[in-house]
Amino acid sequence: MNKVKTILGIVSVCLLTVSCNGFNKLLNSNDYDAKYAAALKYYNENSYSRAAQLFENLTLYYRGKENAENIAWYYAMSLLKEKDYYTAGYQFKRFAKQFPYSDRMEEACYYSAYCKYMDSPEYNLDQSQTQEAIDEFEAYAERWPHSTRIPEVNNCLDELRNKLIRKYYEIAYGYYFIEEYHAAYESFKQFLNDYPEASMREDAMYYMLESSYRYAINSREDKMYERLQQVVNDFDKFSSSFGDSKRLSEAQNIYTKTREAMAKIKN
């Protein structure tokens, strides 16, 4: 039995070697029509890695010729099927620029955004790719508002925006956690301006209030009263927005201490 497995293994290796040699020979040949036919065959057989190599190889030769659009399209699609989202996204965007009147224009713009969506990292990493995906999906939805893909686009946008919301909330909370209260206050303030519908808005407003108080109470004497007045303003905003908040008693305690501090300064 082991001998049979060994023989089958040797045969498989030999066939693979022959196959690879044949593919490499084709890849390096000047028979571009044969390459094009083989690339389509590999694509239709779901052999996307080989298809991508051949389509990439053909791109320069067919530039400006009859099959240029097909080659650019199938090259991008092969990369997408291989889950090489970064390169695929670039190729779809390039396709849209090179063939602006193509029947595949809408699909190319969608896939360009989709590839950036798929390549978007975890929330705690750099989110430039996430923002690019948002920008491209929004541009797509504006240009093709009646597309059947709009529900999917909206779902992707919600996910991407929530990732950004969590990213910037955690940045602000990080400043609060390390007791950098002025930076925390400014970050929470910016967060609330940028994301007024965020689900953690209540927590953000509370931590902004507490950061405002802690920053004010530790300020220089000549700056303290003015900054304590800002705490009062922040409390008014919090209590009017979240009158039934579970943090209201904590917020009121901050307000009471703020008023006491202000009275002490006046006296």
Image (tube, helix red, strand yellow):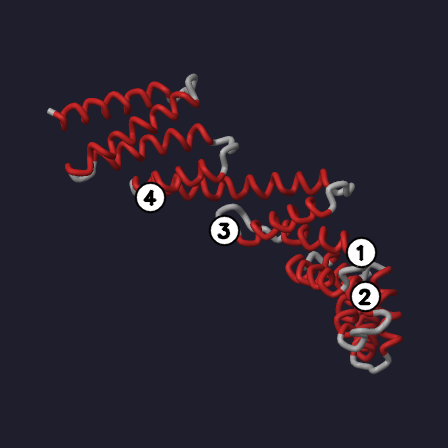
Disc 3 marks which amino acid?
Leu
Could you tell whether 178 is left or right of 141 in the image?
A: left
> Mark 4 is on which residue type?
Ala
Q: Regarding mark 3 in the picture, which secondary structure is present there?
A: loop
Q: Are marks 3 and 4 in contact (CB under 8 Å)?
A: no
- Rendered location of residue 110, percent (x, y): 72, 51
Q: Which quadrant: the N terminus? A: bottom right
Three-letter code, disc 1? Arg
Residue 51: image location, x then y, percent: 79, 66
Q: Give yes or no for contact between labels 3 and 1 (Cβ–Cβ under 8 Å).
A: no
For residue 183, the mark is 4
Mark 2 residue type: Glu
Of badges 3 and 1, nearer the viewer stands 1
How busy is the neighbourhood of tag 2: few (under 14 within 10 Å), some, or many (20 plus)?
some
Q: Dot 4, how many residues are within 10 Å of its Cα: few (below 14), some (14-19), or many (20+)?
A: some
CA distance separating discs 2 and 3? 36 Å
Q: CA distance from mark 2 to mark 1?
A: 10 Å
Relative horizontal placement of residue 167, taking residue 66 as reference (left or right) = left
Comes first in the chain, label 2 or label 1 = 2
Q: Are marks 4 and 2 in contact (CB under 8 Å)?
A: no
Local secondary structure at mark 1: loop
Q: Which residue is mark 3?
A: 125
Residue under label 1, please give it.
Answer: 104
Sequence order check: which comes first, mark 2 or mark 3?
Answer: 2
Q: Which residue is mark 2?
A: 69
